[in-house]
Image (cartoon, rainbow, N blue to C red):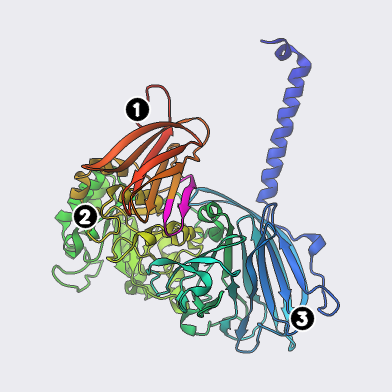
Amino acid sequence: MTQQEADPMAVQRRIRSTVLTLCSTLLATAVAALPAQADPASADRPERLSGQSKSWEVRGPLGSPTATVALDPADGHPTLTIRRGGRTVLEPSPVGLVTERADFSKGLTFTGRSTRTVAEHYTASSGKREKRSSLMTETRFRFRTASGARLDLLTRVAKDGVAYRYVLPGDTGNVLRETSAFTLPAGSDAVLGAYRSDNELQFKRYEAGAAPAGSYMMQALFRTGGGYAFVAESDLNGSYSGAHLTHEANSSTYQVGLWNNEPVQVTGGRLTTPWRAVITGDLATVTESTFIDDIAAPSRVRDTSWIKPGTALWTWLAGGREAGQSLEAQKKYVDYAAERGWPYEVVDAGWYFKPGEWEVIDPNWQTDNWMPELVRYAAKKKVGIHVWLHWTLLTDPVEREKWLGTLERWGVKGVKIDFMDSESQDRMRWYDDVLKATADHRLLVNFHGSTIPKGMQRTWPQVMTFEGVGGEEKRTNTAEHLASLPFTRNVLGSMDFTPGAFHRPFRPNVASDAGELGLSVLYESGIQNLAGTPESYDARPEARRYLEQVPASWKETRLLTGDPGRSAVLARLAQDGRWFIGGTFAGAAQSVDVPLRLGAGRWLVETVTDGPSGLVREPHVVRGGDTLTVPVVADGGFAALACRWFPGRTTCDR
């Protein structure tokens, strides 16, 4: 013991310091847990347009962008502008909507505002990171029309984004259209995907003002002089319809369009619309952001202990409908999943049809269906079964309860629901019903032929993934599309691309097994459905070894390097402290430099690349922050696994 340690006064000082630190921590935690309160200094205070300010700034935490809400003095139309670091991200852009009995796009008078701080902490079941924290400034602007109809514009500003939504406190009838739009600074670039109801078309690079006229998905990335801007929506449910973007030729403005131009039905006289959101910052900020989830409604599932992400062997591309109608074939797939340590196997279309037919068998006729036997067989091998369902089986409340109740009774772990192919308000109401029902029956969910996440995974954490992407099933994907997805579709939430189909001749990285392997990490999905055949994995032992270890839930995600549409390398931190890395590149063969933002100290990084005779695994001992040079073939990529290095360590295998 040193003299200082033996000094009673020194001991007392250390005790007091420890107690004060503990008290401060507990106080900060308690304050963060309290409901966000309105700022008294900025509570409602009526302001007249005449002779008063015509624009109002909303500032978030230090380092946040600034949102400016303004009313045009000539005709009273509202706009929103976003700036970051003194540079423009979004030019003054129209906000507003038109209902059956009021036009909230012009002629508005400002009547007051109120501000509060929103601080939230929550745990995600899947996604880019497990533990989430958000700190936002929320300001409610109150407007009225000349006839007295009222509109509230609710804005939120966080370090990584700006969002707004409309609140109609009175009965103004159904919503006919929105006048919301996003006007980009001149010279901005864009990565856009044309809109279709299943959200499965490819992403391409454009100059924002020169993109072809038409409709685009509400998951658009723009590069502006003020930083990147990712435009999306959040907190969509059956009170509204899904949105997309519309664009006119030679315009830098992208307008918000509603499903099929159909009116939104408003019941009860009051309406709160989904958020219109812009994630902004550098490319890493956008890619790693959870802003779309942060502004969505909190979880409606109280007990989430049964919600377990994981890797699945998906058998559709491996065996098709014939495999889906064969108990013996499915048992072999279960055996293979068990050998790999994969927790799930997915039985696709065909299992509830009569052999050789498409006639549905009633799920209660257990004597006519082999699924209960497969579930029991798989359970003995610690493999959970997921099953495919056509969405129409779940439209009638009685039939929905019969199907989901029976699956729960059998012990099925999840459902893959397909072919909704609509973002109408009526279909979003169907989602509301199915989300509640699957939560009640403790069934994990994978939506195909569907909408895209839009915050749904926070509100309903049993939703493990969505398709809503041009995935491995497509025959015309491009390397540019693969290198766009981490910066577009996967920004929103889990994406069921179904990587790993090494046997498919249609994939754009067909010459790069390493690139295909890297997609299993590059693309996040709460259920990572691997689409290859057992034979294709066995023929690639390095890929099989890697896939046996890759998880489907992550503590953290980091963008290491990327250029949307040309390259993307992401690192994801597993629960056991290992980093998994995946990269994809469009273009000629090259050696790529990857900065290793993994943390201080020494790391063992095992890269898996394409060699002359197949996949090659190579170890590298590096320091955190070093740059690793990796060879990739044309339209190829790589996978890697990193762990803490110590003398004598030669592998990152667990």
Point out the image quarter for the C terminus.
top left
Disc 3 vs disc 2: Cβ atoms closer than 8 Å?
no
Q: Which residues are magenta?
A: 554-568
- The three-letter code of the residue at mark 1 reads Thr
Residue that carries the numbered disc 2 in the rendered image = 503
Residue name at image x 46 percent, y 58 percent: 564
The quarter of the displayed image where residue 353 is located = bottom left
Q: How far separated are the C-alphas under marks 2 and 1?
A: 31 Å
Residue name at image x 17 percent, y 57 percent: 327
Foreground pick, 585 / 462: 585
Crowding around mark 3 (Cα neighbors within 10 Å: few <14, some 14 to 19, many 20+) is: some
Residue 650's mark? 1
> What is the secondary structure assignment of the residue under circle 3?
loop
18 left or right of 389 in image: right
- The three-letter code of the residue at mark 2 reads His
N-term-proximal mark, 3 vs 2: 3
Residue name at image x 42 percent, y 73 percent: 194
> What is the secondary structure assignment of the residue under circle 2?
loop
N-term-proximal mark, 3 vs 1: 3
